[in-house]
Image (cartoon, helix red, strand yellow):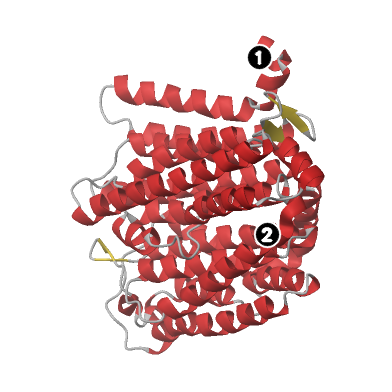
């Protein structure tokens, strides 16, 4: 009762509940006699759903806690709900896979839960120190998750690369935060904003801002801090890759938006130029580097880099409409990406999971439903109307045009056209290449996640107004 009456503690109730539930499941897994994996997996999914309900319905509309270092608003609620959804579906997708490849360990769902606690702290961070704490809490769990398959050299290499480059990016972000603190005398976002409004920017503060952007760009795998993405995506087990591509990207992009808008709104000219460059570089690299890939997971890695570039177009606009566009884009990206990875996990041949694009040959003749769903998701990621991906790109490009960033919007459209080549290539292989052997029967939950992703991409126009209204309310609360 005291916990609920305490204002600061009540604001962080969802995070606290998720952390306590993760510890409880850990104790259960340690002390239970026999295999605890199934029970812990179900418990983790239920815990994430429960916390999502708390996020949506508990607390005030807009409040700050812990001396202003932690904030709960409509933006935080929407982005936290998305991160929790992505984490829960990633656990669902992992259930049968981990058993088949003999990697079923009860620690995996718990690590996902703890990483999600870090994501939620990141999204509500209203101070440079709380930002760093949330980021590191997420990262420490992700380092272990990336190297989960200890018997695989590729998985161990992926985890080590992510750890080394992640430590480097965290150091850059911390150094940038120290510079900002040195030139403003505070670490809290509202006070930084007040100092910049009163005194303007200085050279030292601009340097600090550059280092902070570099650290955040690593977390969203934007160019030139994308080096870890293809190797980690390919080396990690496929459900882990699906998790990396979904929830952590949403949380990192939410943090990116809050950091740029809340404390640094007064110096938008300084960071806008940096984001325009990062956005263009990410879109172009994602479009061209994926063309020559033969591995589905590496192709999706470069696709993810490109999509983060498209999302940053909206942020580079530096306007409320741009933030709204990014939120809608991340909603569409999250569900489409999860749907694609569900399709990949649904495809097994003689008990072996396939990871090469050429293995999709003739899928339409063996599994018409899965072929149609995967094709719709590919069309959506390519941005072909009237599917969901088209609307995501439309909103961010519209924000860029209204901010007079015409060159950025044009380059984005060109990159989108180039990127459509490798998406359409997959559709061509599915429908027109000579059929390979038939795939094994799909797992029930994986099939339904894939079909739900395809339905979302296909029917998005029917409920787009609801999601855009939600995104508009979230963007308004951020401003």
Residue at 64 percent across and 27 percent down: it is 12
Q: Is residue 337 left or right of residue 148?
A: right
Q: Residue furthest front?
A: 203
Residue at 27 percent across and 77 percent down: it is 437
**Image height of 149 relative to 35, above or below:** below
Residue 210 location (% of width, % of height): 57, 54
Q: Is residue 179 left or right of residue 4?
A: left
Residue 317 location (% of width, % of height): 72, 65
Residue at 40 percent across and 32 percent down: it is 40
Q: For marks 2 and 1, give the CA distance.
A: 42 Å
Of 194 and 464, nearer the camera is 194
Residue 54 location (% of width, % of height): 66, 32
Classify residue 108 by image quadrant: top left
Residue at 51 percent across and 55 percent down: it is 214
Element under disc 1: helix
Residue 167 circle label: none
Of 47 and 122, nearer the camera is 122
**Image height of 31 relative to 154, above or below:** above
Q: Residues within 10 Å of mark 1 (few under 14, many from 20)?
A: few
Q: Residues within 10 Å of mark 2 (few under 14, many from 20)?
A: some
Q: Is residue 347 left or right of residue 370?
A: left
Q: Circle 1 is placed at which residue position?
A: 3
Q: Residue furthest top?
A: 2
Of 21 and 445, nearer the camera is 21
Sequence order check: which comes first, mark 2 or mark 1? Answer: 1
Q: Circle 2 is placed at which residue position?
A: 270
Q: Quadrant of the N terminus?
A: top right
Residue 60, visible in the rendered structure: yes
Say if mark 2 contacts mark 1, CB within 8 Å.
no
Residue 286 location (% of width, % of height): 48, 73
Front disc: 2 or 1: 2
């Amino acid at each position: 009762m005291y916990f609920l009456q305490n204002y600061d503690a009540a604001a962080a109730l969802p995070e606290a509940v998720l952390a306590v539930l993760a510890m409880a499941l850990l104790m259960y897994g340690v002390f239970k006699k026999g295999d605890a994996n199934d029970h812990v997996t179900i418990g983790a999914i239920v815990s994430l759903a429960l916390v999502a309900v708390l996020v949506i319905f508990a607390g005030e509309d807009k409040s700050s806690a812990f001396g202003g270092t932690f904030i709960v608003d409509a933006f935080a609620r929407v982005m936290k709900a998305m991160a929790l959804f992505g984490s829960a579906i990633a656990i669902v997708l992992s259930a049968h896979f981990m058993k088949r490849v003999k990697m079923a360990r009860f620690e995996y769902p718990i690590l996902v839960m703890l990483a999600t606690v870090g994501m939620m702290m990141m999204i509500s961070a209203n101070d440079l120190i709380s930002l760093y704490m949330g980021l590191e809490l997420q990262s420490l769990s992700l380092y272990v998750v990336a190297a989960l398959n200890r018997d695989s050299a590729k998985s161990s290499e992926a985890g080590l690369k992510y750890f080394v480059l992640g430590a480097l990016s965290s150091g850059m972000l911390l150094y940038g935060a120290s510079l900002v603190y040195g030139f403003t005398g505070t670490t809290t976002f509202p006070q930084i904003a007040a100092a910049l409004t009163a005194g303007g920017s200085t050279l030292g503060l601009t340097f600090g801002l550059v280092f902070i952007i570099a650290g955040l760009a690593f977390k969203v795998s934007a160019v030139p801090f994308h080096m870890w993405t293809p190797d980690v995506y390919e080396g990690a087990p496929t459900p882990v890759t699906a998790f990396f591509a979904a929830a952590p990207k949403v949380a990192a992009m939410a943090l990116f938006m809050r950091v740029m808008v809340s404390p640094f709104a007064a110096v938008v000219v300084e960071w806008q130029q940096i984001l325009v460059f990062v956005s263009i570089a990410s879109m172009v690299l994602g479009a061209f580097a994926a063309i020559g890939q033969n591995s589905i997971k590496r192709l999706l890695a470069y696709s993810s880099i490109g999509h983060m570039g498209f999302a940053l177009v909206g942020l580079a606009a530096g306007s409320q409409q741009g933030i709204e566009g990014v939120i809608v884009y991340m909603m569409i990206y999250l569900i489409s990406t999860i749907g694609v990875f569900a399709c990949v996990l649904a495809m097994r041949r003689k008990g072996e999971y396939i990871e090469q694009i050429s293995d999709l040959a003739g899928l339409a003749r063996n599994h018409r439903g899965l072929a149609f769903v995967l094709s719709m998701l590919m069309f959506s990621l390519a941005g072909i109307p009237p599917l969901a991906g088209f609307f995501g790109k439309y909103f961010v490009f519209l924000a860029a045009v209204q901010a007079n960033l015409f060159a950025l919007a044009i380059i984005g459209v060109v990159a989108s056209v180039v990127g459509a080549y490798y998406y359409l290539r997959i559709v061509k292989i599915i429908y027109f290449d000579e059929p390979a052997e038939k795939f094994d029967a799909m797992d029930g939950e994986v099939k339904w996640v894939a079909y739900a992703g395809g339905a979302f991409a296909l029917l998005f126009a029917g409920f787009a107004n609801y999601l855009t209204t939600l995104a508009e309310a979230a963007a308004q609360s951020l401003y």
